[in-house]
Structure formats: structure tokens, C-alpha cells
Image (tube, rainbow, N blue to C red):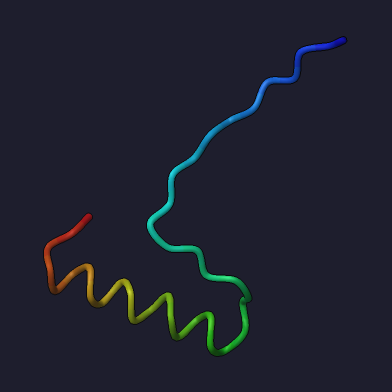
Amino acid sequence: MEHIEREAMEFDVVIVGGGPAGLSAAIRLRQLAIEKNMP
């Protein structure tokens, strides 16, 4: 059986969807991150 390599990634937030609600969520999260001096 062939070995398949997998890449692991850690996320704090996942926004599903690129419509108005997803875009608003992404913008607001970025604003909060800036306010709290987070990367």
C-alpha cells in the first residue's frame, strides 16, 4: 500500500462561504485582531 503524505494546518477560525456574511465576518475578525494587537 502506498504512503500518502498529509499536511496538517491549525486554524483559530474557519469562515465558510464567500458571500456578504462571510466577508463581514472576516472583516470584523480582522478589526478585532488589530484592536487586541494580535497577528
Image position of 38 (left or right of 22): left
Depth check: give the residue in front, 31 or 16: 16
In this rendering, the answer to whether 8 lies above or below 12 is: above
In this rendering, the count of numbered labels is 0
Quarter of the image with the C terminus in it: bottom left
Q: Position of residue 7 (x, y in %)?
A: 58, 30
Extreme residue in the top direction: 1
Which residue is rendered at x = 38% and y = 79% of the image?
27
In this rendering, the answer to whether 14 lies above or below 23 is: above
Extreme residue in the front direction: 1
Q: Quadrant of residue 17?
A: bottom right
Depth check: give the residue in front, 9 or 26: 9
Which residue is rendered at x = 76% and y = 13% of the image?
3
Image position of 32 (left or right of 37): right
Q: Position of residue 1 (x, y in %)?
A: 87, 10
Depth check: give the residue in front, 34 or 1: 1
Which residue is rendered at x = 33% and y = 74% of the image?
29
Image position of 28 (left or right of 37): right
Q: Position of residue 33 (x, y in %)?
A: 22, 68
In this rendering, the answer to whether 5 lies above or below 35 is: above
Extreme residue in the right direction: 1
